[in-house]
Image: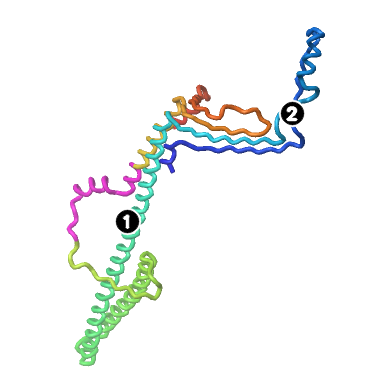
Amino acid sequence: AARALYGPRLMVDAKAFYFNETPTFELGLDTSAVPAEYQALMAGLLPSGPMEAGEQYNVELTVSIAQPLTRLETIRELNHIKRLGVEIAETHGLKARSGSAHAARESAYTLLKIRDGIETLEETETELLARQEQVKAFREAELIGPEQELELNVKLAELRQQLIQTRALEKVATSRLRVVARLDAGQPIEIVAPEVLPELPSLHDSIPRATENRPELTELRLTQAQAEAGVRVKTQEFIPEVNLVGSYQYTAGSTFGTPELAVGAVLSWTVFAWGETYYAVQE
């Protein structure tokens, strides 16, 4: 749409009228100063009464073309602004995809951590159950006192309570991962932990990479370039506007005709607007 402004604009204006009566006009000549012998001669040459001025209809067709000259640079800047807008939109998409990927990865790692915790708690529970059987045998043989058996039962109860809470957290984390990854409610989730984690760069190397590649900063740079182009567009409003124009006009009926073909240039310049353009540039 911005590139289309480079080309000439073609405009068509058509009018058609029909009048309730034929238009007429009268000569209205003052012959008082003409000698009498010539008045009779003129009376024979000139029609008496009103004369027909044309037909009972009027048709006008005008075809015009206009080509901007001084605004070509403005159009180029507007095209540049639109292209930057496309890049900003692409950056928005990149930022959204990056955010979604990060949220999905974070949810998956959280779920892995919770499942590892559940596995560890289940192993501990198995060990405590085995120790419980051993303690019962020692208690029956009166090798240990009741307080040791009670202490083990308390640990086992606390562990099972913690296991219940961790399994509840697993359900919450699974639901969150389904929401982030747009998965169906009943779809099972299987996560495979990476065997080898990628080697992370140092903080010294990460800072310039983040400054260069973060989509938020890319969006800011594009927005700044777009604003600078907007300043240049506004500044060009100080320049007079010159357009090449050409027109073809066809007339039929009651209107006196005008030249069919016309070419030329049109200049328009707002010399004073109470600082509107100046303050728009500053803004």
x then y, percent, for residue 180: 37, 64
Q: Quadrant of the C terminus?
A: top left
Q: Is residue 8 visible?
A: yes
The part of the chain drawn in magenta is 198-221
User: Tag 2: Cα neighbours inside 10 Å, few (<14), some, or many (≥20)?
Assistant: few
Pick the front one: 202 or 15: 15
Label 2 secondary element: strand
Q: Is residue 282 visible?
A: no
Label 1 secondary element: helix
Q: CA distance from mark 2 to mark 1?
A: 80 Å
Q: Nearer the viewer, mark 2 or mark 1?
A: 2
Q: Is residue 18 magenta?
A: no
Identify which amino acid the numbered label 1 is placed on. Ser
User: Which mark, by number, is residue 98?
Assistant: 1
Badge 2 is on which residue?
52
Identify which amino acid the numbered label 2 is placed on. Glu
Q: How many marks?
A: 2
Residue at (48, 33) in percent of width and height:
66
x then y, percent, for residue 123: 23, 79
Residue 67 placement, left or right of 18: left
Pick the front one: 170 or 73: 73
Residue at the extreme bottom: 141
Pick the front one: 49 or 110: 49
Residue at (64, 34) in percent of width and height:
252
Q: Between disc 2 and disc 1, whose residue precedes?
A: 2
x then y, percent, for residue 222: 35, 42
Q: Are marks 2 and 1 in contact (CB under 8 Å)?
A: no
Q: Is residue 105 above or below residue 94?
A: below
Pick the front one: 219 or 66: 66
